[in-house]
Image (cartoon, helix red, strand yellow):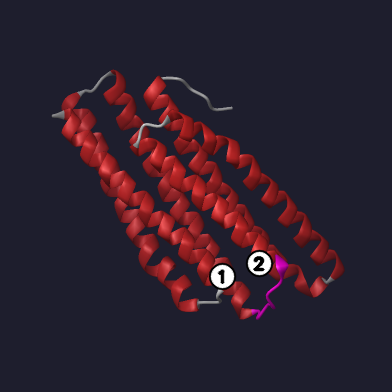
Amino acid sequence: MIEEHINRLKGRIVSYTYHVENMLKNSIKGLLESDVRLLTSVIEIDEKESNKLDNSIEKECIAAIAQFSPKAMNLRTLLMIMKMNKDIERMGDHCANICYNSLDIIKMEVSKSKFYKLIEQMSAEVQLMLKNSIESFVNEDIELAKSVRKRDEKVDKYQKDLTKYFIKKMKKKPDMVECSLFFIKIVNNLERIADLSTNIAEDVVFALEGKVIKH
């Protein structure tokens, strides 16, 4: 009985992750293509749906714990799903933040430059981390989960390099300060999504092995 509830919750959390993954793809696509309609859709439709899913999944997890008083592996799995749920909801918030900043950038009519490609590459790495973190959960793949942690370093490098680039830009061109700050915010939001994907991967290891690998 408890297993049926857990399997249903697993399916729901996977669907939720795909929803947020799509939000991430569209937020970056909206920036790269200056697509105001797409960015607005992520904010006004997708982000609201993300919040509804968060509340619904949390309530179902609490109900399962109250009804079945699970122990050991089942309890760890439910606790992991609850934590994953919160991490995924925060990813949705970061995607919305990217959209807000992108809309501000579009208003400034910034010319496309090489850093757009770097942001696209950074986003692709973050999307892969998110995809693999949920795959490691679905397939109970500890090695895949651990590989997500390793790739977080690559995303951190993107963040540092792009931040340095925009700081230099602000020093050389004072009229680019506001725009550069919006880009830095986008980069930081991507980095946070990568961190949250790493959290999920670490939780997978905890659920399967009962071992904490954070820090």
Q: For residue 182, say whether it is visible.
A: no
Amino acid bearing label 1? Leu
Q: Which residue is mark 1?
A: 31
Q: Residues within 10 Å of mark 1 (few under 14, many from 20)?
A: many
Residue drawn at 59 percent across, 41 percent down = 151
* Residue interval drawn in magenta: 108-114
- Which is more N-terminal, label 2 or label 1? 1
Q: Is residue 43 above or below residue 60?
A: below
Q: For residue 31, say whether it is visible.
A: yes
Q: Residue 106 in the image: state x and y as whole percent.
A: 60, 77
Q: Which residue is mark 2?
A: 116
Choose between 127 and 187: the one closer to the eye: 127
Q: Is residue 141 above or below residue 31?
A: above
Amino acid bearing label 2? Tyr
Q: Residue 176 in the image: state x and y as whole percent.
A: 76, 72
Which element is circle 2 on? helix
Residue drawn at 17 percent across, 26 percent down = 68
Q: Residue 111 in the image: state x and y as whole percent.
A: 69, 78
Outermost residue, right direction? 172
Q: For the residues labelled 1 and 2, say whether their Cβ atoms are less than 8 Å apart.
A: yes
| Residue 194 in magenta stretch | no
